[in-house]
Image: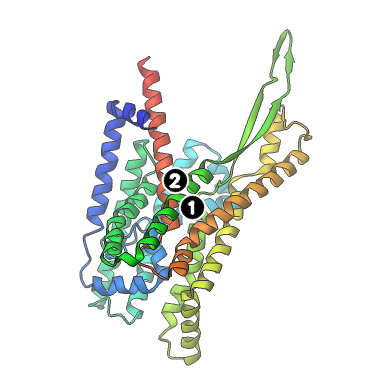
């Protein structure tokens, strides 16, 4: 792999693309440290440390929420808009037809996603500011209408700015821009985590810290293994005789990935968990006593490690199956194979092929779903066993980092291969 990257670096177009991506990620981190006025950053960080559910939202914003910077929401509204249009493609036949139009249809969907990001950013920034105002932690030092409007507009503009940067990065064909921005936020938080761990270190914690390192290494290996794992279903194409020419008879495989859905199920699960938490924050100071009691009970239940971990795990597993069924259609695969004269040895074409693919997919998805579930609740498990939260291993963070690195390396290698063919 390193040899391929070294060769890619020697190609001017690829090297310039990599340097551009690095410059854009540096620009993102600079913007992430430009704070908004009228916000007590110290009180804000304490609030996020005390609320692990909102800490998940901070993860996918790239760590920008802790500073409440001009890009506080990160790319979360854009991700939400993308998910909405993916789901609408299942429900609305007109959008499904547009998605099938190839590059032209994809451009149209991308434009709609950009437009939908603006109102979503406004709504999410308003909800975030409302939660901070009702938290009772005196995070906002000013609460007049003009100041709140300025905050909402600034945060919305920051999200659009990051969306633009992400698309510029994607155009360089060295990785997905949005994923790389989240990757940059996660990596940027590592030095502070390591520093905090060493500040509180003493000799009696040596075994615990070594265990953390071992778990991190095992997690990275597991992420690579599951991400690259796939089941190759054999496919045979029947021979076709046209006049004196004979074609077909080719043996091939249909790859079924163990983890087809990537980190999307975790994002779905986070959205579901965040919703009752945000609603509870709104009603925790309600004048009606039973409503306030219900909100406090809900927040206390979500703060419980056992309840939170179990709910998070079940949601991730469930959404893994759901999203896999969205992106992989056994009926369409079976129909396409039959049209092309292909069949799975020992399985009749048509409905039996669809049933066979469904059964195989359900079995391998179980392994991927359980893996994603364990990765998602890994920090809770580590804290439960060690009793310490100073150096908790973020399984979701490792999953995102490793997945983004693998995807970027593959794109860089493909770009280098294309340039080599151009030379020859």
Q: Residues within 10 Å of mark 2 (few under 14, many from 20)?
A: many
Q: Position of residue 137 (x, y in %)?
A: 30, 80
Residue at 70% over, 30% down: 339
Q: Please tell me which residue lies in front, 114 or 79.
A: 79
Q: Is residue 333 left or right of residue 371?
A: right
Q: Tell me the crowding category of disc 1: few under 14, some 14 to 19, or many 20 or more residues within 10 angstroms, Cα based.
A: some
Observer-nearest of 139 and 345:
345
Looking at the picture, how far across and down is residue 410, in whole percent? 43, 35
Farthest residue in the front direction? 203
Verify CB contact (< 8 Å) between mark 2 and mark 1.
Answer: yes
Query: Residue 263's mark?
Result: 1
Q: Is residue 77 above or below residue 252?
A: below
Q: Is residue 384 left or right of residue 97?
A: left
Find the distance from the CA under tag 2 to the CA under tag 1.
Answer: 9 Å
22 to the left or right of 358: left
Q: Position of residue 337 (x, y in %)?
A: 69, 32
Is residue 325 at least partly visible in the picture?
Answer: no
Q: Which image quadrant: the N terminus?
A: top left
Quarter assignment of residue 147 = bottom left
Label ID, residue 214: none
2 vs 1, front mark: 2
* SS assignment at label 2: helix
Where does the image place residue 349, in percent across and percent down from the top left?
76, 34
Residue nearer the viewer, 339 or 64: 64
């Amino acid at each position: 792999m390193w040899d391929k990257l070294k060769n890619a670096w020697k190609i001017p177009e690829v090297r310039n693309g990599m340097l551009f991506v690095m410059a854009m990620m540096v620009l993102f981190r600079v913007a992430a440290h430009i704070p908004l006025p009228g916000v007590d950053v110290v009180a804000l960080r304490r609030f996020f440390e005390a609320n692990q559910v909102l800490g998940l939202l901070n993860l996918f914003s790239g760590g920008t929420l802790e500073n409440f910077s001009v890009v506080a929401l990160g790319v979360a509204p854009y991700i939400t808009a993308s998910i909405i249009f993916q789901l609408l493609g299942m429900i609305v036949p007109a959008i499904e037809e547009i998605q099938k139009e190839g590059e032209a249809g994809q451009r149209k969907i991308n434009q709609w996603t950009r437009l939908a990001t603006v109102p979503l950013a406004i709504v999410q920034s308003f909800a975030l500011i409302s939660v901070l105002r009702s938290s009772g932690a005196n995070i906002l030092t000013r609460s007049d209408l003009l100041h709140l409007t300025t905050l909402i507009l600034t945060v919305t503009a920051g999200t659009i700015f990051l969306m633009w940067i992400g698309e510029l990065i994607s155009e360089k064909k060295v990785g997905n821009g949005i994923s790389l921005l989240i990757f940059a936020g996660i990596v940027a938080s590592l030095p502070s985590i390591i520093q905090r761990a060493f500040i509180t270190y003493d000799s009696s914690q040596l075994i615990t810290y070594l265990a953390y390192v071992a778990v991190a290494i095992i997690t990275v290996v597991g992420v690579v293994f599951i991400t690259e794992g796939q089941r190759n279903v054999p496919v045979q194409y029947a021979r076709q005789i046209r006049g004196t020419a004979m074609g077909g008879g080719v043996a091939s495989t249909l790859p079924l990935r163990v983890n087809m859905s990537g980190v999307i199920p975790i994002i779905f699960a986070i959205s579901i968990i965040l919703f009752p938490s945000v609603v509870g924050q709104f009603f925790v100071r309600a004048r009606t006593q039973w409503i306030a009691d219900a909100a406090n009970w809900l927040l206390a239940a979500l703060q419980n490690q056992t309840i939170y971990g179990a709910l998070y795990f079940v949601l991730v597993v469930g959404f893994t199956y759901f999203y896999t069924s969205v992106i992989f259609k056994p009926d369409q695969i079976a129909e396409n194979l039959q049209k092309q004269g292909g069949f799975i040895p020992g399985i009749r074409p048509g409905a039996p092929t669809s049933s066979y693919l469904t059964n195989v997919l359900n079995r391998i998805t179980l392994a991927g779903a359980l893996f994603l579930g364990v990765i998602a609740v890994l920090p809770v498990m580590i804290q439960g066993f060690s009793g310490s939260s100073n150096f908790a291993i973020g399984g979701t963070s490792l999953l995102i980092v490793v997945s983004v690195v693998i995807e970027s390396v593959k794109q860089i290698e493909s770009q280098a291969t294309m340039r080599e063919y151009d030379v020859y």
